Amino acid sequence: MDDTQQPTILIAGGGTAGWMAAAALSRFAAGHRIVLVESDAIGTVGVGEATIPQIHLFNSAIGLDEAEFLRETRGSFKLGIEFDGWLRDGHSYMHAFGQIGRGIGLLPFQHYWLRARQLGFAKPLQRYSLNELAARTMRMQRGRTSAGAEMPYAYHFDAGLYAALLRRHAEARGVERHEGTMASVDRDGGSGDIASITLDDGRVLAADFFIDCTGFRGLLIEGALETGFDDWSNYLPCDRAMAVPCEGGGDFTPYTKSIARKAGWQWRIPLQHRIGNGLVYSSAHLPDDEAAEMLLANLDGATQADPRPIRFTTGKRRKHWNRNCLALGLAAGFMEPLESTSIHLIQSAISRFLALLPDGRPSEAAISHFNAQADFEWTRIRDFLILHYTANERHGEPFWDAVRTMPLPSTLTDKIALWRDTGFIHREHEELFTEVAWFQVFAGQGVEAQGHNPIADTLDEAQLRDLMQGTEAALVEQVRAMPRHIDFLQDFINGRAKEPA
Ligand SMILES: Cc1cc2nc3c(=O)[nH]c(=O)nc-3n(C[C@H](O)[C@H](O)[C@H](O)COP(=O)(O)OP(=O)(O)OC[C@H]3O[C@@H](n4cnc5c(N)ncnc54)[C@H](O)[C@@H]3O)c2cc1C
């Protein structure tokens, strides 16, 4: 690049990752030329439709209007994830977004709940969660409740429609799109950096920096740069998914469902026009044809396509940023969608990259800082996913027996031990999942805490009863005042929703 030229960032791939990167860079990397290459012949992975609340930050940062976004992507609101059968058949709990109960002073609610449970009058966590009470009664609102409480939410949306919406925004801001299939990735003979990509029709596209969004293929980060992969299938042994959309049956839940099955679990993601379903499973424990049968036998309505198999290996690239190439989305690695984290990982990598946006050749210090943060973020999410599996009581089912007894990473065993001994949960640095998230999964998966903080004992029994009952009664009252999710959604996308004052 000479001084008169804009530096060029080439995004290879136009799935959710590619178009999220294009939308964000075209908004924030002023002074850069942004080019995106995608192949209609290859297509996208076509799944990835449940999110976590942080997606608001991304959508609003790139200037998407929320009602337009939900209208265009045929989306719905999401208040949490229900885990059905994960402890044992017939048992269900939710990881709901937002707070559980209310603490007093410095002490979080979990210690009061643990003490109330010891005394025999604590109710299941759902009675102290605004989100779960609303989700289970199919209610929804935005903004603060009558009592001033926040109800955080995320979305379910159609991934193809989301990419199309992002594309419109990105192209309107000058992103150049090339349709074509990449045939080779060409490296500079001197530096070893990526210099250009060549399409199968002979077009050569050169750039200063490359973002690999080519999906599981990782054509740049692995195919060209041979970065290496940390395989985590010893901790998360599912290696297949079977996905199928089906018709919805009228009203739909404002939460994702994750239902434990013989050798994995089934997702259910309700949208306005269909329900997204899939089975994530371990091929060592369940043949593909049985997986397809199991999925088809457990749908709400008629299928809209044939079940589509997807193979994956859980893990991550050793470096997400290598030389002048950043890997995003499936090219960076994959952890199963149990807690809907992949799109968030794209978003957080984009924002860290923008904070370190190279001015010329990338700095080694910036690269290693970025990679250390990515390692931390991914391993802590991995640990949270493992917790759902390892603490199961599905005795006698080979898959579930194996994941209950497998060796765990020490980062997770330390966290479990601290909880068991003291009822304390430590959120380190900017770990994605908060104390409240871990609390819900510990409680839901039956991981018992033996103790609680003795500060909770300073309330006498009557005061503790008042705290528990008062919290529950206030939340029930707030939820009663909310509209039904489906009505709220229709009003919101049509500009008729009444927001609380
Ligand atoms: C079973 C499953 C369920 C999931 N569920 C969720 C979920 O609920 N929530 C969530 O957050 N995430 C989920 N994910 C992850 C989510 O789907 C991905 O993070 C997201 O779709 C990003 O994918 P991508 O853009 O990296 O890859 P892809 O969608 O695969 O896109 C790759 C792009 O690269 C292009 N490409 C590839 N090779 C070439 C070539 N040679 N030449 C030109 N172009 C090429 C393709 O055409 C395409 O445009 C799920 C993933 C799987 C596998």
Image: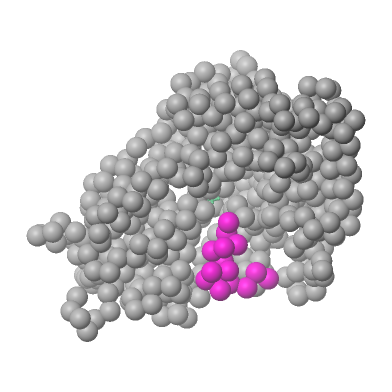
Q: Quadrant of the N terminus?
A: bottom left
- Pick the front one: 289 or 68: 68
Q: Quadrant of the C terminus?
A: bottom right
Q: Residue at x 78, y 30 (%)?
A: 458
Image coordinates for residue 161, horizontal then vertical, percent: 56, 65
The stretch in magenta equals: 54-67
Find the residue positioned furthest to the bottom.
4
281 over 321 or under it: above or below: above
Among the 4 quarters of the image, the one containing residue 44? bottom left
Image coordinates for residue 217, horizontal then vertical, percent: 34, 50
Lateral position of residue 282 relative to residue 198, left or right: right
The verdict on residue 64 being magenta is yes
484 over 233 or under it: above or below: below
Lateral position of residue 227 relative to residue 268, left or right: left
Among the 4 quarters of the image, the one containing residue 433? top right
Q: Residue at x 31, y 43 (%)?
A: 318
Quadrant field for ligand 1: bottom left
Q: Main secondary structure of the magenta part?
A: helix
Find the residue positioned furthest to the top.
396
Lateral position of residue 397 relative to residue 254, left or right: left
